[in-house]
Image (cartoon, rainbow, N blue to C red):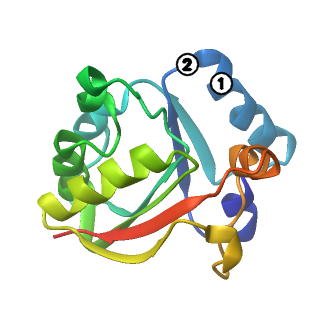
Amino acid sequence: IGMAELHPEKAFIGIETQHDIAYFPGKAAKDKKLDNVRIICANAENLLEWFEPGEIKELYLNFSDPWPKKRHAKRRLTYRDFLKRYAVILKEGGEIRFKTDNKDLFDFSVEEFEAMGWQLSDVTYDLHAAPVPGDVETEYEEKFSRKGNLICRLVARRP
């Protein structure tokens, strides 16, 4: 919602699997009369059904479920099967902007991006020590950083 407010000229599509969680950004967009926001309540596994190859310029993966058990790694949104999907729908030079407070997920994600040939930049384990201009703090980011959690962030460019 913050990014949509900052950039009314861009379209923002939120994807969330849980209806009760998807409700809040949808309501906020409606209340703020943001016509550049849409919410899809479905599983991100279906991305290739919704978007044409090269249709997306940037993907934001903000505080996704870390799926901490090793056996659930393939459910993580930075697992290589998801990265393959993202590479299809992202334009040439397209980027993923990834933020989390979960260091284990971040480390896993760095390894996955590198293994799949994504070019990493702006990798930090403490975003708030050197904030990025134009980066909007999400609700979860604010919540977790208030608890003392460090916020990890990176930008990954499509191979």
Q: Position of residue 72 (x, y in %)?
A: 29, 23
Residue that numbered label 1 is attached to? 21
Whether residue 126 is situated above or below residue 64 in the rendered picture: below
* Residue 139 image position (x, y, % from top left): 75, 46
Type of amino acid at the residue the image marks with label 1: Ile
- Mark number for residue 18? 2
| Location of residue 49 in the rendering, given as x and y in whole percent from the top left corner | 24, 34
Residue 106 horizontal side relative to residue 45, left or right: right
The C terminus sits in image quarter: bottom left
Q: Is residue 98 left or right of residue 139?
A: left
Residue 5 visible from this viewpoint: yes
Query: Left of 4 or right of it: where is 143?
Result: right
Find out whether the residues at labels 1 and 2 contact each other: C-beta distance under 8 Å: yes
Q: Residues within 10 Å of mark 2 (few under 14, many from 20)?
A: few
Amino acid residing under circle 2: Gln
Looking at the picture, tell me which residue is in the foreground, 33 or 94. 94
The quarter holding residue 104 reads top left
Residue drawn where x is 18% and y is 45% of the image: 80
